[in-house]
Image (cartoon, helix red, strand yellow):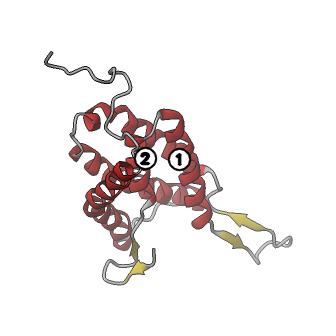
Amino acid sequence: MPSFDVLHGARITLFPVLLAYGSLALPYPLVLTLAFCSGLLWDLLNLQVITSTATLLKTPSVEVFAGTSVVLYGLLGTLMHGLRPLFLRGRWEIHVLLSSLCTIAILLAEFLVLNLKRGGFDFPPVMWWRILAPGAIALLLAPVVYLGFTILANLLHYPVRENPREPRGLHRGI
């Protein structure tokens, strides 16, 4: 999404929120597939190629390689999937909070990787806006996204809240 001047250039990032819901609703192999696709798409959308005129060869260099976020998305998807039993019991609040924290973690990790690549750590106040504002927006958007995907899953008869370890038809109190 485009950047907002009111938020000092911060952008709304939907990939971490989609990954968070996918890691709750999908089986683990599909969570890893979603993490791979989301991380790769995130890196390709934010790919920065720098061409330097200072060198004689004038070869372009990439600041963050495509595929770097795949590992981070995989770790965060695994963390969210590990908390799936809470979601299956109807507790979704912790996952909304985690989708916000995952958004902040992804943006902070990308910023730290860029600083390591550039050889110095500079934390201007505008960068904190660009890291924390998308996390706050993700906190507000996550319940809407979760509700929308849950309604879509119900319309498509996909069992989001069904625990595959419990046999069908058995009730807990009986």
Place of residue 140 in the rendered image (x, y in percent of width and height, measured from the top left): 25, 63
- Residue 78 in the figure: left or right of residue 70: left
Q: Which residue is mark 2?
A: 22
Report how far apart the C-alphas of labels 1 and 2 lie in the structure: 7 Å
Tell me the crowding category of disc 1: few under 14, some 14 to 19, or many 20 or more residues within 10 angstroms, Cα based.
many
Report the residue at 33% width, 33% height from top: 162
Occupied quadrant, residue 135: bottom left
Report the residue at 46% width, 35% height from top: 27
Q: Nearer the viewer, residue 13 or 51?
A: 13
Say which amino acid is labelled 1: Leu
Say which amino acid is labelled 2: Gly
* Residue 63 seen in this snapshot: yes
Place of residue 130 in the rendered image (x, y in percent of width and height, measured from the top left): 38, 69
Q: Which residue is mark 1?
A: 34
Q: Quadrant of the C terminus?
A: top left
Q: Nearer the viewer, residue 38 or 49?
A: 38
- Answer above or below: position of 66 versus 60: above
